[in-house]
Amino acid sequence: MVEVYAFATPNSVKVPIALEELGLPYKLKAVNVRKGEQKEEAFVALNPNGKVPVLVDDGFVLTESAAILVHLAEKTGKLLPSDGKSRARVFEQLFFHASALSPAFGNAGFFKRSSPEPQPIAEARFATEAERILGLIDRRLADRAFMAGEAFTIADIAHFGWLWRRQFPGLTLDGRSHLSRWYETVAERPAVQRAISRVEALVPAA
């Protein structure tokens, strides 16, 4: 069975969503990042970068959420188009997510909520960039149902993780009708709801 080391984080939730969509059985193993468990020796042996998620698939250990999504899609032949141009559109969005959306959202949240000292210049820079990116993807969705076209793919799963946790960087979907429509469509998928329920259950009760 596939094992996923994860927590209720934007990057972690992508993997259970993909697995639920693909109908693959899996076991979640909690790594409490709030307690620093991702830096413990046993976990670092799986991922030297000390971050969740990690996938263990029949002894094959894989890190980085986008790489995991590609692996699962290629393994099953689902959620990733087979023709070259459509496939390239999905990868375009995955690379955009890794290089732009995720860093902007993560850094905006860090400087807003977690920085040991106030850093107003950094906070403003990343918050502005995150807002710009929201505008970009809202406009992108004006003429297509999903991020890479008319079909739901791993590109949508990648973006959904941070949109699901948009409160952390203090962002909203207000005034972005296309993005709001897309988010509601994805959030209503039964597989997405099951995955969210499972990752939220990893958080210990207060």
Image (spheres, rainbow, N blue to C red):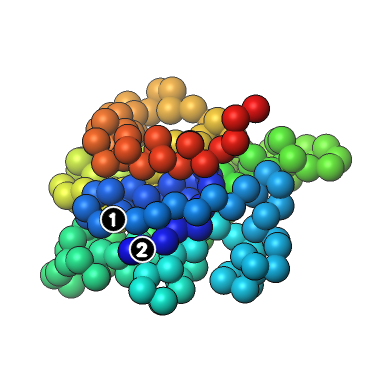
* Residue 94, position as x, y percentages in the image: 38, 60
Quick one: which residue is furthest to the top in this view? Answer: 174
Displayed quadrant of residue 137: top left
Q: In the rendered image, which residue does mark 2 sit on?
A: 2
Rendered residue at 43%/47% (across/down): 13
Q: Which residue is mark 1?
A: 25
Q: Earlier in the sequence, mark 1 or mark 2?
A: 2
Q: 47 or 173, which is in the foreground?
A: 47
In the picture, measured across the screen, residue 17 lies left or right of residue 62, that is: left
Q: What is the number of the mark on residue 97? A: none
Q: Disc 1, disc 2: CB below 8 Å? A: yes
**Which amino acid type is marked by label 2?**
Val
Q: Quadrant of the C terminus?
A: top right
Taking the spot 43% from the left edge, 68% from the top edge, the residue there is: 56
Q: Is residue 150 left or right of residue 70?
A: left
Place of residue 142 in the rendered image (x, y in percent of width and height, measured from the top left): 25, 37
Q: Is residue 54 above or below residue 134?
A: below
In the rendered structure, which amino acid carries the disc numbered 1? Pro
Please provide percent x and percent y for residue 54. 49, 63
In which quadrant of the rendered view does residue 108 lie? top right
Instruction: Say which of 106 and 126 sits in front.
Output: 106
Element class at badge 1: loop
Q: Is residue 189 above or below residue 36?
A: above
Q: Residue 85 versus residue 107: which sits nearer the camera?
A: 107
Q: Please determine whether, in this image, residue 42 is positioned above or below residue 150.
A: below
Q: Residue at x 46, y 42 (%)?
A: 199
**Residue 118: percent from left, percent from top:** 83, 37
User: Is residue 127 shown above or below 93?
Assistant: above
